[in-house]
Each structure stands twice: as structure tokens, then as C-alpha cells.
């Protein structure tokens, strides 16, 4: 019996946390993922930042002022965090939501009443509101700290496009519940596209584009039609807004966000007080 | 962590391919001159640009389907005798977004008859309601009000409701064409197509 206990103790020594850690760190799986080892010097830490596909977008070093909440408000980071939250919750909603006239409204209602964790849709909605607010505050902070000035003027422009994309994501998502509020908001909103110069059938210059008597830009061939897939907000509009909301706009926004973060590094990190 | 980068020596090195011999025909075909090379490049870039433009055009055209599953822009709206003089006919509001108004005298057409009025508020596109008691169209969104003729008189709307082309079909029914609209502020209500004289 004592012999057996000794044997178990002997085995337990092999299972001590230090031994296990050593064993894991020497395994082929671990070494194929973490090739450099623990970065225990400034040089190695820099190499980690430069060499990792996830971290290389970030500056190697951050100024002390760059992590001061009173300076940055962390609004860019919060915006990105909310984007990740919205991507995740949006993906979950897509498992239930069907973008057709028959199902859109009842699916949104069922998401609240029949699906476990019915708050998921509200998280998506609140997160969307919060993201729009955070983007504006981020822009305000960047403006007030003069961070749009050279060499950061390119990144300012990328940010402005990202702001527009955020608003478009908010706008396209607004239609998807397919209630009266959504339909009329998009009807009113998309009426602006009628007045696009040359491309909207009520816009300036559109009347000039004629083939004899036939107007080339009419209500079935203008910018608004391309947006709605019809002459009014209907089946086509719902599907188009759904595709733009779930795939098109997030793809473009994700691409531009990578550039946005990378340019912070290229332009010398987060701007600091002079 | 060991960082011995040892090239695997065991792998057999494949024999190098023999150096390519200069083309035998090279003696006959002259090397391209700078001029001909540049003109070929210009042609190639022009062709590439043209093909890209064509692809972009085709992609844009993809967004405009050939068939629309929407109510047709023209529809038959029954016989004129079904509407009383002075009545606002709301039968076609839900499906076609049109009011038919029969009037004893219309100052724009200078006659009695029927006109087809759009139910789209000219402020921001909501649908007003016909209030029989007050004899006016009233928009619930922002309070725009219109007379029975369609002319605006209250609320934020900047201009009157629009009228659609209206005629009699061969079978004697009213035919409304929503693809042709007439705006009062442009003086288009005088157009004979905007009013069905009876």
C-alpha cells in the first residue's frame, strides 16, 4: 500500500505545474504557434509587435500621453470594441432573421419573445446607437487635439469615410425590423437619392439626359432605384439593405479600419501634446 | 528556446535544368523596337481599361432587373359614374396610392370632371388622410394640409400634391397612368392629360 502511494507521489511530481508548463512549451504545437518564446527584452517585444499579424497594425511603442483617458477618451477603441460586439451579435441574429416581407417583422418579434437571451437583438440595437455616438465623440476629440494635421491628414480622411460607413450601417439596419417606423424612415431617407445630380430622376441635370423624348434617368433607372431595387420601399429594398448591412458595408468598413489602425502607427503613433 | 536554423541537408537537390538555348528563330524575327513595344503596350492598356469599364458597366446594370413585381404604373379605376360630384374616392389609395377626385369645376382645366391625385405628401413622402368633415387632406407625420384640389395651405410642405395622367380606356373605364405626373407649381395642371373632362 505504501509502495503504491509512493508511486502515485512519484507520478504527481511529473504533473506539477512547472513540469506541465515545460512539457507544453516544448511541444511541437506550442512552438509552431509561438516561435520566438517569451519576449523578455525590449528588442524581442518590438519584434513581437512587428511580426504578429494581429499586433503589427499597432504602434510598437505608445506615448504616455497616448494612454491618458483624459486625452484620448478611448473613443476610437470603444468604437472598435462596439464594432466587434455588433459583428458578433449580428451574426447570432442572422441565424433567426429572414429578410422577406412575410417573415422580417415576426422574426424580429420572435427574437425577443421566443428565443433564449431575447436581449440579444437589443444589445445589437443599443450597441449600434452607442457606436454612432462614440464615432462622433472620437471625431470631436481628434479635431480638438488637432490630430488631423499633417502627417495625419490621410488618416483623418479615412476616418471621415468610416464615419459615413457607420451612419450607412445604422441606416441600412434601421429598415430590417420592417415596422412602420422603418419603412417610412427609409422612404423619406431614400427620397434624398432622387435629387442626386444627374443620377437621380428629380436631381439637377437629370432632365438633360434624354434620348429624343424618352428620359434616360427615370424613376426605374436612377440612383434611388439602384438602392431600393424598386420604385418604392418593398421586397427588393429589404433584401438589398440586408445584404449591404450584413456583408457589403462591414467588409468595406473592416478593410478601412485595418488601414486606419495601421496608419496610426505609420504616422508616429497617437498624437501627443506638443 | 533553441533557434538552430539548420537547412535540411537530406533532401536531394534536383538537377538544375539546362540553360535555355537562344531561340533558333531569333535570327529571323527582329527584336521589337522601343516604338513598336510602346504602341503595343498602349494598345494593351487601352484594351484592359476598356474591358474593365465594360465589366463595371455590366455590374452596374446587374442592379437594375428586367422585370419588376410591383403594381403596374397604369391601372383601370372603374367607371366615372361610380364617383359622385364633389367626392374624394379612396378605393385606390391602399393599392395604387391614388385619390380620384370628381369636381364640378376645376380652375386649372377650366371644366368639370375627374383628376387623379397622388397620395404621397410632398413634404417628406408620408401618406396624408382625407378628412371629409374639414374637406382637406391632412398629413399625420408633420401636419401638412392640402385643399381638395391638392394645393397646399398649411404645414411644412413646400408644394401641392401631384396629379397623374388620366384618360378614359376603350371600355369606358377610367385609366390612370402613374408614370406621367403633373406639378401645379410648374404650371402642368393645365395639361389636358392631367384632367378627365366630363
Image (cartoon, rainbow, N blue to C red):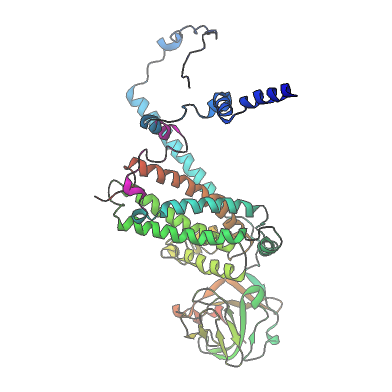
Q: Is residue A190 above or below residue A148?
A: below
Q: Is residue A115 left or right of residue A126?
A: right
Q: Quadrant of residue B118?
A: bottom right
Q: Where's residue A212, x and y in %?
A: 48, 61
Q: Nearer the viewer, residue A273 or B15?
A: A273
Q: Where's residue A91, x and y in %?
A: 61, 51
Quarter of the image that includes the N terminus of chain A: top right
Q: Quadrant of residue B96?
A: bottom right
Q: Is residue A68 above or below residue B32?
A: below
Q: Nearer the viewer, residue A129 or B173?
A: A129
The range drawn in magenta is: A47-68
Task: Report if residue A62 lies within the magenta region.
Answer: yes
Q: Nearer the viewer, residue A212 or B127?
A: B127
Q: Is residue A160 left or right of residue A127?
A: left
Residue B59 seen: yes
Q: Where's residue A5, x and y in %?
A: 71, 25
Amino acid at each position: 500500500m505504501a509502495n503504491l502511494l509512493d508511486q502515485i507521489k512519484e507520478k504527481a511530481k511529473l504533473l506539477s505545474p512547472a513540469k506541465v508548463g515545460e512539457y507544453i512549451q516544448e511541444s511541437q504545437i506550442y512552438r509552431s504557434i509561438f516561435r520566438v518564446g517569451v519576449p523578455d527584452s525590449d528588442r524581442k517585444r518590438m519584434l513581437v509587435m512587428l511580426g504578429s499579424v494581429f499586433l503589427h497594425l499597432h504602434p510598437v511603442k505608445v506615448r504616455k500621453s497616448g494612454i491618458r483617458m483624459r486625452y484620448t477618451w478611448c473613443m476610437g477603441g470603444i468604437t472598435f470594441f462596439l464594432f466587434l460586439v455588433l459583428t458578433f451579435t449580428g451574426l447570432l441574429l442572422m441565424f433567426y432573421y429572414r429578410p422577406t416581407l412575410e417573415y422580417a417583422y415576426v422574426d424580429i418579434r420572435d427574437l425577443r419573445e421566443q428565443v433564449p437571451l431575447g436581449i440579444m437583438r437589443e444589445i445589437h440595437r443599443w450597441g449600434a446607437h452607442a457606436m454612432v455616438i462614440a464615432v462622433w465623440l472620437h471625431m470631436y476629440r481628434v479635431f480638438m487635439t488637432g490630430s488631423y494635421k499633417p502627417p495625419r491628414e490621410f488618416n483623418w480622411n479615412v476616418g471621415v469615410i468610416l464615419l459615413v460607413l457607420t451612419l450607412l450601417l445604422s441606416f441600412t439596419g434601421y429598415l430590417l425590423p420592417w415596422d412602420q417606423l422603418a419603412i417610412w424612415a427609409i422612404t423619406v431617407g431614400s427620397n434624398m437619392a432622387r435629387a442626386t445630380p444627374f443620377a437621380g430622376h428629380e436631381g439637377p441635370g437629370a432632365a438633360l439626359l434624354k434620348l429624343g423624348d424618352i428620359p434616360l434617368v427615370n424613376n426605374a433607372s436612377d440612383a434611388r432605384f439602384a438602392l431600393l431595387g424598386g420604385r418604392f420601399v418593398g421586397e427588393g429594398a429589404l433584401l438589398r439593405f440586408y445584404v449591404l448591412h450584413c456583408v457589403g458595408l462591414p467588409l468595406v468598413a473592416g478593410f478601412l479600419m485595418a488601414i486606419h489602425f495601421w496608419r496610426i502607427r505609420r504616422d508616429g503613433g497617437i498624437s501627443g501634446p506638443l | 528556446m533553441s533557434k538552430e536554423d539548420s537547412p535540411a541537408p537530406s533532401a536531394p537537390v534536383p538537377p538544375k535544368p539546362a540553360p535555355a538555348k537562344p531561340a533558333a528563330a531569333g535570327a529571323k524575327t527582329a527584336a521589337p523596337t522601343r516604338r513598336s513595344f510602346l504602341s503595343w503596350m498602349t494598345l494593351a492598356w487601352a484594351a484592359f481599361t476598356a474591358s474593365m469599364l465594360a465589366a463595371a458597366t455590366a455590374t452596374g446594370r446587374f442592379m437594375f432587373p428586367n422585370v419588376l413585381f410591383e403594381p403596374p404604373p397604369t391601372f383601370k379605376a372603374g367607371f366615372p359614374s361610380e364617383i359622385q360630384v364633389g367626392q374624394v374616392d379612396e378605393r385606390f389609395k391602399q393599392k395604387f396610392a391614388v385619390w380620384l377626385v370628381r369636381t364640378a369645376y376645376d380652375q386649372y382645366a377650366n371644366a368639370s370632371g375627374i383628376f387623379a391625385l397622388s397620395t404621397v405628401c410632398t413634404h417628406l413622402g408620408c401618406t396624408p388622410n382625407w378628412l371629409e368633415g374639414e374637406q382637406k387632406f391632412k398629413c399625420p407625420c408633420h401636419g401638412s394640409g392640402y385643399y381638395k384640389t391638392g394645393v397646399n395651405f398649411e404645414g411644412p410642405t413646400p408644394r401641392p400634391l401631384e396629379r397623374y395622367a388620366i384618360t378614359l380606356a376603350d371600355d369606358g373605364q377610367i385609366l390612370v397612368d402613374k408614370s406621367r405626373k403633373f406639378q401645379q407649381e410648374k404650371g402642368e395642371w393645365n395639361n389636358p392629360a392631367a384632367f378627365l373632362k366630363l
